[in-house]
Image (spheres, rainbow, N blue to C red):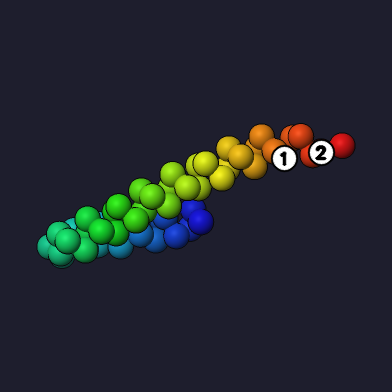
């Protein structure tokens, strides 16, 4: 999931350089959403991973 976030950030930067403002804004918002989902899943895996270890 973090890989998709990086891909969308790079896509947003490239689109912004070439002047496609709408595409850049859309890709940046998708990257932001994916990043926050990644952070939430990472924190949950840290919390629940320690509970189930022997």
> Is the residue marked by circle 1 packed among few (<14), some (14-19), or many (20+) residues within 10 Å?
few
3D distance between C-alphas at marks 2 and 1: 6 Å
Please say if the residues under marks 2 and 1 sit with CB atoms less than 8 Å apart.
yes
Residue at the spot 12% in from the left edge and 62% down from the top edge: 19
> Is the residue marked by circle 2 packed among few (<14), some (14-19), or many (20+) residues within 10 Å?
few
Q: Residue furthest left?
A: 19
Residue at the spot 61% in from the left edge and 39% down from the top edge: 44
Q: Is residue 47 visible?
A: yes
Q: Nearer the viewer, residue 19 or 25?
A: 25
* Quadrant where the image shows the C terminus: top right
Residue 45 on image: x %, y %: 64, 42
User: Seen in the image, is 33 located left or right of residue 40?
Assistant: left
Residue highlighted by disc 1: 49
Say if 13 sits above or below 46 in the image: below
Residue at disc 1, secondary structure: helix
Residue 16 on image: x %, y %: 18, 58
Residue highlighted by disc 2: 53
């Amino acid at each position: 999931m973090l890989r998709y976030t990086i891909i969308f950030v790079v896509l947003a930067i490239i689109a912004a350089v070439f002047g496609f403002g709408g595409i850049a804004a859309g890709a940046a918002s998708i990257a932001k959403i994916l990043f926050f989902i990644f952070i939430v899943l990472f924190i949950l895996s840290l919390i629940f991973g320690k509970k189930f270890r022997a």
